[in-house]
Image (spheres, helix red, strand yellow):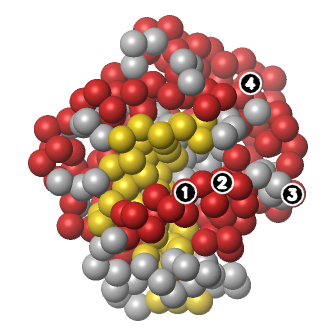
Amino acid sequence: MGELRSEVGRIVEANGTKLYHEVRGDGPPVLFIAGATGDAGHFADVADELSDEFKVITYDRRGNSRSARPPGWVRTSIAEQADDAAALLDALSVKSAVAFGTSGGGTILLELISRHPESVRGAIAHEPMLVGVSPTAPELSPRLHLMSQEAFAAGGRRGAQERFLRWACTDEVYEAIDGDLRERLLGNGEVFFGLELPHLLSYLPDADAIRRAGVTIIAAAGIDNKGTFMAEGVEWLKHHIACDAVWMRGHHAPYLHPEQARGFANAVRPWLKQLAG
């Protein structure tokens, strides 16, 4: 599968779609999987920090930002998203990589481990969105639906996306996001609310398949989210997969804040080194 240049980064054909991706550095490969809004730019500052030691791969998930929506693409699944990640690595001739997935990207990461364990050398699941196994799911799912409906009514898809990002990432982080990146994120509201969110809310991880994969997993969450929904996925992994659970400084998305990204990169660096072996 040949690569095609874009203005920044590259476009690669993978799993029947074209994925925009960026590669920094030349060490052990690390794949970053974004959650809601699915943009490689989530990790640009973190990738810059880590590129001195790792080959950092970031990408716009299918139909988001610079990964153009495939013709006729009207539905997705967590399995499709996981297959995209595995196909991207294959297209880049990366046999296996340490994978970092956050929020909805953490959900995709767990499915990637279940479906393509050979592609994952080790994994960091950062606050994975596991509403389907959450004890607060009966209250949370309707709350998210109501929030999105109210935001749609007030400001359309862009307004709904902004409200979701402010809710998930905090106002401080949202206001600090680079202007060009923020515009791309807001433009992904149709894909997130229309195609992705229903699957994220209903996804049930296969604990047996994850354990059988034999992939070392580190479950991570922000200390400020301890005891909240954001950390429930970490608690589920700790108890059902028997993996290590670690706590980091900050909230849900410090990697999006230019002044917090370096600290985030420094926090995950030793875990990446450990998993890369």
- The image quadrant where one finds the C terminus is bottom left
| Residue marked by disc 1 | 268
SS type, badge 3: helix
Q: Are marks 3 and 2 in contact (CB under 8 Å)?
A: no
Q: Are marks 3 and 4 in contact (CB under 8 Å)?
A: no
Q: In whole angstroms, how far apart are the C-alphas of marks 3 and 1?
A: 26 Å
Q: Earlier in the sequence, mark 4 or mark 2?
A: 4
Residue ID at (40%, 83%) = 92
Q: Earlier in the sequence, mark 3 or mark 1?
A: 3
Whether residue 36 is visible here, answered yes or no, is: yes
Could you tell whether 92 is left or right of 214 in the image? right
Residue ID at (59%, 41%) = 248
| Residue marked by disc 3 | 179
Whether residue 115 is visible here, answered yes or no, is: no
Q: Residue lying furthest top in this view?
A: 139
| Residue marked by disc 4 | 151
Q: In whole angstroms, how far apart are the C-alphas of marks 1 and 4?
A: 34 Å
Residue ID at (43%, 52%) = 124
Q: Are marks 4 and 2 in contact (CB under 8 Å)?
A: no
Task: Report the mark closest to the observer, 3 or 2.
Answer: 2
Q: In whole angstroms, how far apart are the C-alphas of marks 3 and 4?
A: 21 Å
> Where residue 177 appears, x then y in whole percent?
81, 52
244 and 205: which is toward the camera: 244
| Residue marked by disc 2 | 264
Q: Earlier in the sequence, mark 3 or mark 4?
A: 4
Q: Is residue 57 above or below residue 9?
A: above
